[in-house]
Amino acid sequence: QVQLVESGGGLVQAGGSLRLSCAASARTISSYVMGWFRQAPGKEREFVAAISRSGGSTDYADSVKGRFTISRDNAKNTGYLQMNSLEPEDTAVYYCAAALSTRIIITPTQYDYWGQGTQVTVSS
């Protein structure tokens, strides 16, 4: 069982930045692909970014490419999502997820564990 706890959300003006963190309970988090998803009110949960077990490979949704950066520190059992040039359309609850997989996954149903989410609100 892996527990994930997100932090770092908040209210920011358009153009600003936030850094989300995802602390994992498992010492074997390096065995898991990590991903970030978001869900806005009335919308389905959507893929934002994912990172391979070693951190050597990443994937991003087109809507955040060039603005967001996913990373991880396996020694600290923590994943990160650096969000720059934030836009009001980025407003959502952001979720961290982990999948016991050898390759990057962008489909939420294939993730095994989820955090409780952290709210990100971008004002115009």
Image (cartoon, rainbow, N blue to C red):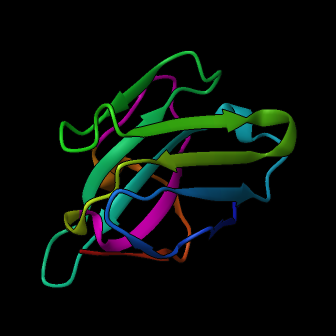
Residue range corresponding to the magenta coloring:
90-106
Front-most of 90 and 50? 90
Left or right relative to 90: residue 120 = right
Question: Residue 101, image x and y in percent?
Answer: 51, 32
Q: Residue at x 31, y 65 (%)?
A: 14
Q: Is residue 117 above or below residue 80?
A: below
Determine the image quadrant of residue 93: bottom left
Determine the image quadrant of residue 113: bottom right
Determine the image quadrant of residue 92: bottom left
Q: Is residue 90 above or below residue 58?
A: below
Per the image, is 99 magenta? yes
Give the farthest residue toward the top. 56
Counting labels gives 0
Question: Residue 69, image x and y in percent?
Answer: 47, 36
Q: Is residue 79 above or below residue 124?
A: above
Q: Is residue 107 above or below residue 21?
A: above
Left or right relative to 14: residue 44 = left
Q: Residue at x 28, y 34 (%)?
A: 65
Quarter in which the N terminus is drawn = bottom right
Question: Residue 99, image x and y in percent?
Answer: 51, 44
Left or right relative to 80: residue 11 = left
Question: Residue 89, image x and y in percent?
Answer: 19, 65
Quarter in which the C terminus is drawn = bottom left
Left or right relative to 97: residue 121 = left
Q: Residue at x 41, y 29 (%)?
A: 104
Q: Residue at x 30, y 40 (%)?
A: 106
Give the farthest residue toward the bottom. 41
